[in-house]
Image (cartoon, grey):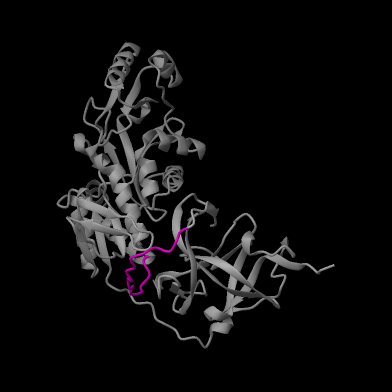
Amino acid sequence: MEKTFALGWEEWAAFPKLGLPAVRAKVDTGARTSALHAVSVEPFGPLDKPQVRFIMHPVPDKPEIEVICSAPAVDRREVTSSNGERELRWVIETPMKIGDRTWPVELTLTNRESMTYRMLLGRQAIGEDMVVNPGQSCAQGALNYELYKDFPRRRPVKRPLRVAILTREPGNYSSQRLKDAAETRGHVVEMINTARCTLALDAADPRVFYDGKPLPAYDAIIPRIGASMTGYGMAVLRQFTMMGAYCLNSAEAIGASRDKLYAHQVLAREGIAMPVTAFAHSPKDTNNLIAHVGGAPLVVKLLQSTQGRGVVLAETKKAAESVIDAFRGLEANFIVQEFVKEAGGADIRCFIVGGKVVATMMRQGEAGEFRSNLHRGGSATKVKVSKDERLSALRAAKALGLSVAGVDLLRSSVGPKILEVNSSPGLEGVERTSGKDVAGMIVEYIEDHVRPIARKTVRRKKAVAARPAADTAP
């Protein structure tokens, strides 16, 4: 009987042909494919036998150690990560050594710099004679990062970045502040009108054209996409992602936040407190809608509303019925929400950058106005938020997958309630009220998430045949 080969829940692997003597890997039988950390991935060579060159940082806390690797490309495949995001990845095949055994494995290449492990070993690479013991670490022995002590070091250098701001309003305060903050730090910034972009879809060479001329490869994209341009803006953003740009907020996260009904469903699923919300299609359900949110007074809100437009306070049941009937007559999609009277026409905006609340303000509506939007004449003042309010805002942004967000919440008698999550929050009110350089913080966050490595673009006219697999890998 053939002896089984034991693997622990984590193992040390070596890749002789990649020049990697030690890579710490997490063994995950729940993932189909295996993934290896890679940045600056670049295809080269003949179209019928393509190769891939990439840079590997094998030691998580020492980015100055760089190994330039290359291997034959066997595929380019769409992979769905554990958080639901899809990514088009190059796939290589190379020998892997764990313990005293060496065998060929397929690896998808992706940026895993935020992960503890530089590699994930999926079940496809685990042989039939192998057994995974989830209670054991390094069943095949441990290596260490001392094997890289003689490798050359490269001191990380903050290089000038080429940044594009997707906006149809290049002259507004937020766009100009972001541009000024980036240029102050030595970066090059270009304003791109989303509506003037044309997309050329090609698996090996996706491109974006602007007024008929091809746009260059950008290091980072700052999306400031208006509500009227959400659908097309998301498509443009996905295209830039395919071209290798770092996008401050993903297209999926922006879409989720813009769909108010879906956003509330996500918040409810995560157990995040919010005003009671109801939605129905049938005109026969008007009374049920009103009853679900506790009766009048209540708020009727268009799903596509922005800056307080399309938001109506109905103070009586009769008024609520009239507003609901009017919206239905316009064939508009809307939700009905509980009115939090004790908030007194005020809400709190928490500005989040990279999982931190960096600035806050309280917005107060004019006398007799329940909407606190600054665009509608509301005023803003400094405010100190509680621990529960800070945590609620952070959870809401994380639930929708937003790196930068403006989270609006109400102070109710039972604690904070999330009102809305904005994926393109304005900077003017919060910067002037808090005195914080929020634009600078956003640029610094981008700098930390774009690798300081010069990129080269290799144009290829034909695509490597892509397999439409529904793989799953963190």
Quadrant of residue 183 within the rendered picture: bottom left
Can residue 350 be seen? yes
Residue at position x 44%, y 78% in the image? 64
As drawn, 235 above or below 242: above
Farthest residue to the front: give it.
Answer: 48
Can residue 424 be seen? no
Quadrant assignment for the N terminus: bottom right
Where residue 228 appears, as percent x and y from the top left, is 25, 39
Residue at position x 36%, y 25% in the image? 341
Where residue 300 appears, as percent x and y from the top left, is 33, 24
Quadrant of residue 34 within the rendered picture: bottom right
User: Which residues are the magenta region?
Assistant: 450-466
Please indicate whether residue 74 sits to the left or right of residue 361 in the image. Answer: right
Residue at position x 53%, y 68% in the image? 118
Q: Nearer the viewer, residue 232 or 157?
A: 232
Q: How many marks?
A: 0
Residue at position x 35%, y 13% in the image? 317
As drawn, 14 above or below 438: below
Quadrant of residue 310 within the rendered picture: top left
Q: Which of 113 and 297 is in front in this view?
A: 113
Q: Does the magenta stretch include residue 215?
A: no
Farthest residue to the left: give it.
Answer: 171
Q: For the stretch drawn in magenta, what is the main secondary structure?
A: loop
Farthest residue to the top: give it.
Answer: 318
Where residue 437 appears, as percent x and y from the top left, is 26, 58
